[in-house]
Image: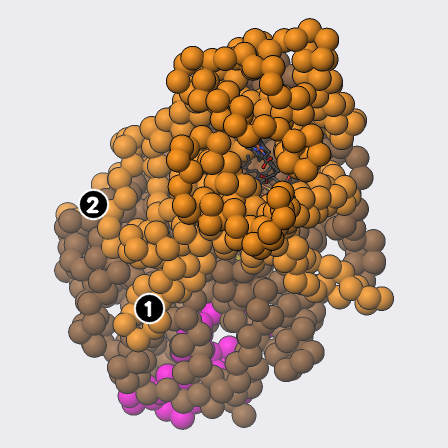
């Protein structure tokens, strides 16, 4: 891939050429994800199983693939008002066009949310509307052909379902919904990607995306406890599958297997110990994230079911969730509907402050940022901000917590109480207008790196701005995929800015009872 | 192509009406049959479409949240942008439909200068033009009610005075006419900017030409080819009370204005103009952001295959034992 400056020089976001109804996609290496391996398709029992790759000329589609798709579309339209409405009412005003990070970063006009949606809409018009049947191209209708299908695959796996376009659309048309529908359709004829199906299959079997079996899960938590002992001199426990605990804690599995997520995990463990929370991890529900969401609502439900099932079995009172983006989309907007009602649980009450979390009274699960912000507000934590002085921090709102939950102030409140230096990025790139990292919705595959880096460009440019203006050297965020994706994105576009979780900052600042003098921060770097 | 074709289509329609009246005296077709047919198509189509939307379920709460959620008492929650109550949703929808709130957020991504810095400039023109266009349209349609109501209500007369800034001569021009023309001209010309041209379909231009034609013919009707407003009223009452009078009393311009409107009405249910109804039903805007406080019901929720705890425990029995993780049947 070219140097950042080269890419920026040739980037064209104002003057697209050609006609979106024409043109075939070219599967250029670096800009698409590989097909799902047969083994995992089989494990999940997905439709039309086979080995295949998007760059194969022959996709080995089922013979009646067209009927399957059109029947499928009919079904989805019947089941979902949003989709039907969004198919009908777009006025092509173009307000959403330059709001998508993939369009800004790649300049590919079919990455404008409105055109992405038109790819599906044109087929909808052709088979489901009168004017489309009569006037075809003139009415913006297209026949469903293999080329169209390939184009769907290419562009609907170039949308991170981040919902930024929906904020700007005068009717709230949410291209995420359209992408979800298109992916469900593609799945019906067996076109799905490894980076989604494999984690989903792992999660279905072992309980987490990485396929970590229970003993290894316990082992890594053990490593974390050792590290905490080295840093603080305190012995901590991390109960697993403990029946009768008050709280079940569920975090994305990357937190205990990837970096820089790891330091966030240390932060959680230290916090729970310090406040004496009666909680448990689960090795069965050892994943908060849900790659099923990027595949189909059915798969999302199949994976998500474990959380309630486990809470019921362990007889906990309520559930606490870690830092993750799409995990919280599922928990906030889907879990209760899919797998509820959670009438075997109680309304979450913080055992330390007594605060009743009324806003989660039905789902009975709260976000750790809500929990910690409440602790801080009630002065239950002894925090030494100076331990984070090394860092000049900015905060990246992860799309899902921002636009699907409205979790905007809690993390900022925590950061301001744990750090001395905090600066916001430009207003158009934060809170509900936040830019995606470019790797969400299952697109974080290595083979897709070029596209991800381009998609991450708008976020990175905003970071660059605060870096140059305030000397920012740390980007805090609350999403497992962000933590995995942004280091590479920032390295490429900005360099010199690291990525951390919010609870890493808490772990650093937390003054624990009986701790030894801290020599290093959680990353093992000497404190100044 | 995208532009020329719809342009000539509208021109052809106008000629068709012109010729019909001028050479064939087709008052019955243009003055009776077309309005009734178009009106019937419009009503049936509109109602059918809205019913289709309304009966399809909303399986999940998919609010697009644009502000701070309601959570902890010490954090100020954004009452409108992240509504947790019905009142909040109501106000949010009011802002959306009356003031195009979301459109007013618009900005423009630009690569600026030699360094090609990515910046976001303000871009309120689309919003402004849309507001001008839609509000003027509303005022014009309201003023038109004077052709349909007898006696003409006072507020319409007042609106009329207001709209003409109380000019005293006989046929004052209306401010709304100027504003709607400015609005639609902007909306039209912006569709030629490369990016908007790329996303536009012929139908987008067609609607603008059609509405443009209505506006032009309306203005001509008022200021140049005057129509006798009394006969207009008689004519409309005839249609409304199903006692149509084919009427030759007014000129071609009236028929052009009138038939273009009929065509717009008939086309409306099959076009993007349905946004006027759809905007109220959009699930990303009209649901409360309270999905953790109140369970949203999915009417087609169905049981799915899951990997149950028992199956899982069986599969990992040895690993669990080795690690000393408690099991259901004890660790024996
Ligand atoms: C509740 C009523 C309505 C609302 C909230 C509404 C809202 C909007 C909004 C937000 C836009 C997008 C901005 C733009 O492109 O101008 C739009 C576009 C448009 N509206 Fe409406 N509208 C309503 C009713 C109508 C009616 C009754 C008509 C005409 C018969 C109409 C005709 C149009 C047209 C032609 C466009 C596209 C303009 C373009 O080509 O850019 N709208 N409307
Ligand atoms: C059945 C429906 C309609 C009838 C019978 C009708 C008739 C007329 C008549 C008789 C005039 C001349 C008024 C005068 O001399 O003061 C006029 C003007 C006008 N009409 Fe219509 N019209 C109809 C619907 C519409 C609609 C839907 C629009 C908008 C899209 C529209 C836009 C205009 C405009 C812009 C004028 C210029 C003067 C003014 O603003 O009042 N008309 N119309
Ligand atoms: S902002 Fe909404 S209405 Fe406008 S083009 Fe985009 S999706 Fe369509
Ligand atoms: S949801 Fe996000 S990635 Fe998808 S089209 Fe909209 S802005 Fe682009
Ligand atoms: S990975 Fe993070 S930034 Fe990207 S879509 Fe998910 S929540 Fe958004």
Q: Is residue B183 above or below residue A490?
A: above
Measured from the top left, where is residue B127 in percent x and y?
A: 60, 53
Which chain did the image draw in orange?
A: B
Residue bearing the label numbered 1: A370
Note whether B75 is above or below B137 in the view shown.
below
Few, some or many C-alpha atoms within 10 Å of disc 2 (few <14, some 14-19, many ≥20)?
Answer: some
The spot of residue A413 in percent (x, y) is 40, 77
Give the residue furthest to the top: B24
As displayed, is residue A123 above or below residue A175? above
Mark carried by residue B236: none
Hue used for the chain lettered A? brown
> Residue A80: x and y, percent?
40, 32
Task: Tell me the magenta residue range.
Answer: A498-526
Where on the picture, by quarter, is residue B209?
A: top right
- Badge 1: chain ID: A
Residue A520 located within the stretch drawn in magenta: yes
Q: Could you tell me which secondary element the residue under label 2 belongs to? A: loop
Do the residues marked 1 and 2 share a common chain?
Answer: yes
User: What residue is shown with label 2?
Assistant: A341
């Amino acid at each position: 891939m070219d140097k950042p400056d080269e890419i920026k020089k040739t980037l064209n976001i104002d003057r697209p050429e050609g006609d979106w109804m024409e043109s075939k996609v070219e599967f250029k290496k670096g800009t698409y994800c590989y097909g799902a391996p047969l083994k995992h398709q089989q494990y999940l029992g997905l439709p039309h199983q086979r080995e295949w790759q998007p760059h194969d000329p022959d996709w080995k589609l089922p013979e009646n693939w067209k009927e399957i798709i059109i029947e499928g579309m009919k079904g989805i339209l019947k089941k979902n008002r949003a989709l039907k409405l969004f198919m009908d009412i777009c006025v092509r005003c173009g307000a959403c066009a330059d709001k998508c990070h993939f369009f800004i970063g790649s300049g590919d006009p079919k990455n404008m949310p409105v055109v992405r949606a038109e790819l599906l809409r044109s087929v909808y018009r052709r088979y489901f509307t009168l004017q489309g049947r009569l006037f075809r191209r003139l009415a913006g209708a297209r026949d469903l052909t293999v080329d169209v299908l390939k184009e769907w695959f290419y562009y609907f796996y170039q949308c991170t379902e981040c919902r930024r376009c929906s904020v700007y659309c005068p009717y709230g048309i949410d291209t995420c919904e359209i992408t979800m529908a298109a992916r469900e359709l593609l799945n019906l004829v067996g076109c799905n990607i490894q980076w989604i199906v494999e984690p989903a299959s792992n999660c279905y079997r072992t309980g987490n995306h990485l396929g970590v079996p229970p003993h290894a899960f316990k082992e890594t938590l053990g490593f974390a406890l050792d590290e905490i002992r080295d840093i603080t001199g305190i012995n901590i426990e991390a109960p697993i599958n403990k029946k009768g605990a008050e709280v079940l804690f569920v975090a994305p599995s990357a937190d205990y297997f990837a970096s820089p997520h790891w330091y966030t995990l240390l932060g959680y463990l230290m916090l729970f110990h310090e406040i004496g929370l009666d909680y448990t991890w689960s090795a069965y529900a050892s994943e908060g994230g849900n790659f099923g969401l990027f595949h189909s609502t059915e798969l999302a439900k199949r994976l998500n079911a474990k959380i309630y099932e486990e809470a019921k079995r362990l007889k906990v009172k309520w559930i606490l969730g870690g830092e993750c983006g799409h995990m919280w989309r599922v928990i906030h907007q889907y879990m209760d509907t899919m797998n509820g009602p959670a009438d075997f649980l109680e309304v979450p009450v913080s055992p330390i402050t007594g605060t009743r979390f009324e806003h989660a009274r039905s789902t009975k699960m709260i976000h750790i940022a809500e929990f910690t912000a409440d602790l801080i507000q009630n002065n239950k934590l002894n925090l030494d901000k100076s331990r984070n002085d090394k860092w000049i921090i900015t905060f990246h709102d992860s799309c899902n917590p921002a636009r699907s939950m409205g979790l905007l102030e809690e993390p900022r409140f925590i950061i301001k109480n744990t750090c001395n230096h905090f600066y916001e990025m430009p207003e158009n790139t934060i809170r509900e207008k936040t830019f995606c990292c470019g790797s969400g919705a299952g697109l974080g595959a290595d083979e897709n790196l070029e596209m991800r880096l381009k998609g991450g460009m708008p976020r990175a440019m905003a970071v660059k701005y605060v870096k140059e203006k305030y000397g920012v050297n740390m980007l805090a965020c609350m999403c497992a995929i962000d933590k995995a994706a942004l280091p590479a994105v920032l390295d490429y576009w900005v360099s010199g800015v690291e990525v951390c979780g919010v609870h890493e900052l808490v772990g650093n600042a937390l003054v624990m009872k009986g701790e030894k003098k801290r020599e290093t921060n959680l990353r093992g770097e000497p404190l100044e | 192509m995208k532009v020329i074709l719809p342009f000539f289509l509208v021109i052809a329609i106008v000629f068709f009406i012109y010729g019909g009246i001028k050479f064939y005296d087709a008052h019955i077709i243009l003055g009776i049959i077309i309005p009734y047919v178009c009106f019937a198509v419009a009503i049936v189509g509109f109602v059918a479409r809205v019913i289709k939307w309304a009966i399809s379920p909303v399986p999940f709460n998919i609010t697009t949240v644009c502000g701070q959620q309601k959570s902890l008492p010490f954090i100020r929650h954004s009452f409108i942008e992240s509504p947790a109550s019905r009142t909040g949703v109501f106000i949010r929808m009011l802002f959306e439909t009356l003031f195009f709130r979301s459109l007013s957020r618009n900005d423009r991504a630009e690569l600026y200068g030699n360094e090609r810095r990515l910046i976001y400039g303000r871009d309120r023109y689309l919003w402004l033009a849309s507001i001008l266009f839609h509000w003027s349209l509303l005022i014009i349609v309201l003023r038109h009610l004077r052709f349909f109501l007898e006696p003409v209500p006072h507020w319409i007369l007042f609106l009329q005075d207001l709209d003409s800034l109380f000019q005293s001569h006989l046929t004052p021009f209306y401010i709304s006419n100027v504003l709607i023309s400015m609005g639609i001209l902007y909306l039209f010309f912006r569709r030629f900017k490369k990016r908007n041209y790329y996303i536009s379909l012929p139908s987008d231009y067609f609607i603008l030409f059609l509405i443009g034609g209505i506006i032009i013919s309306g203005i001509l009707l008022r200021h140049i080819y005057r129509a006798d407003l009394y006969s207009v009223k008689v004519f409309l009452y005839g249609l409304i009370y199903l006692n149509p009078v084919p009427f030759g009393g007014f000129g071609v311009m009236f028929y052009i204005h009138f038939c273009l409107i009929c065509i717009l009405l008939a086309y409306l249910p099959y076009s993007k103009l349905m946004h006027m109804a759809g905007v109220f039903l959009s699930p990303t805007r009209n649901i409360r952001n309270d999905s953790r406080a109140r369970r949203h019901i999915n009417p087609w929720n169905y049981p799915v295959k899951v990997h149950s705890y028992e199956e899982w425990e069986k599969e990992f029995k040895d690993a669990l034992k080795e690690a000393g993780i408690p099991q259901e049947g004890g660790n024996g």
